[in-house]
Amino acid sequence: MSWTRREFLTRTAALGVFGAGASACSSTVDGSPRPGAAPPPAEQSVAPSGVPSIRLGIVQYQPYTVEQNGEAAGPVPDVARAVLAKLGHSDVGIELFRDEPAVVAGLRAERFDLVGGVAVRAELCRETRYSLPDTVTGTALIVPSDNPKGLRTYAEVVAAKAKVAVMTGLAERQDAMRAGVPAADVVEVPVAHQLVDAVRGGQVDCAAFDDVAARDMARVLGDGAVVTTESFFPPGRSPVIGAYLFSAASAADLLEPFNATLRELHDSGEWLELVEPYGFTAANQPPPGLTTEQACG
């Protein structure tokens, strides 16, 4: 079975592959109450200021969305709340979903004003409205803490004749081979945590994965024995770009001020302050000038 990266991250979060904090953090998941959860807030509740609440749907996966003290946290909800608060929307109702199709269907049905945790894709660009790009993710290598072979990108893997572990069904296998790594030196593993295990056990010299997820796994599972390289973009493949998706109705009034405020958040450095605690770095900030139209291709 071949998964998209987004499907993989959603499923590993649901299964807790990356460790604690993968459980849902709002009172509803996939539209159904969680066992023992507080009753969901009314969708059309009104804040004391009289500003109608904003309904935000999120595709849940770590470390983009995590649970902290029973609240949705992480770059996706935190950045959205920061932007919306600056626009006067202090009452934001968040609903988490395991699967992207479900939350996109909710957006189409006007159940949400916007959704987060959805990568920019051409087919969605044609029928909905994206915000400005909010995140970019590339690739990082998981290496032993002393990185004895000095591996930084696939170029060093090729030069050192090193072995690299990748997860079955994801893009890193093709990326590595496109960069010149021989097929015999690409070792596939079926489960994400085995990338770290393979490096720690010496079966491979490094493992390649989504940069943000790689850092999270190294931190949670590495026990100090592994580190990650700086993010890089493999030749021949565009980075994964994350943005917020708006319903047709909400885009008319909300998209333009949301974009202006999101841009201010990035330009001021406040965006980086919000996302750094979750393992994001300046490398995950979209390059200046990257537009929604360019991201949509």
Image (spheres, rainbow, N blue to C red):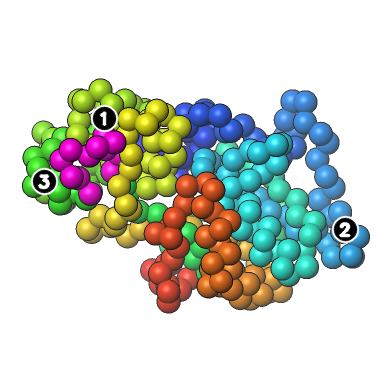
Among the two numbered marks 3 and 1 on one chain, the one whose residue lies closer to the N terminus: 3
Q: Which of the image's four quarters has the N terminus?
A: top left
Name which residue type carries label 2.
Answer: Val
- Residue 147 part of the magenta segment: yes
38 inside magenta stretch: no
Quadrant, the C terminus? bottom left
Please name whichever residue, 101 or 286, is drawn nearer the observer in this view of the structure.
286
Residue marked by disc 3 = 158
Gap between marks 3 and 2, in whole Å?
58 Å
Q: Which residues are magenta?
A: 141-152
Specify the amino acid type for callout 3: Val
Residue lying farthest front? 146
Mark identifier at residue 46: 2
Residue located at (75% from left, 59% from top): 54
Please give left or right for residue 130 compared with residue 153 in the image.
right
Residue 59 in view here: no
Front tag of 3 and 2: 3
**Viewed as shown, does residue 39 lie left or right of 271?**
right
Q: Within the image, what quadrant is residue 259 found in?
A: bottom right
* C-alpha span from label 2 to label 1: 52 Å
Q: Position of residue 106 (x, y in %)?
A: 66, 50
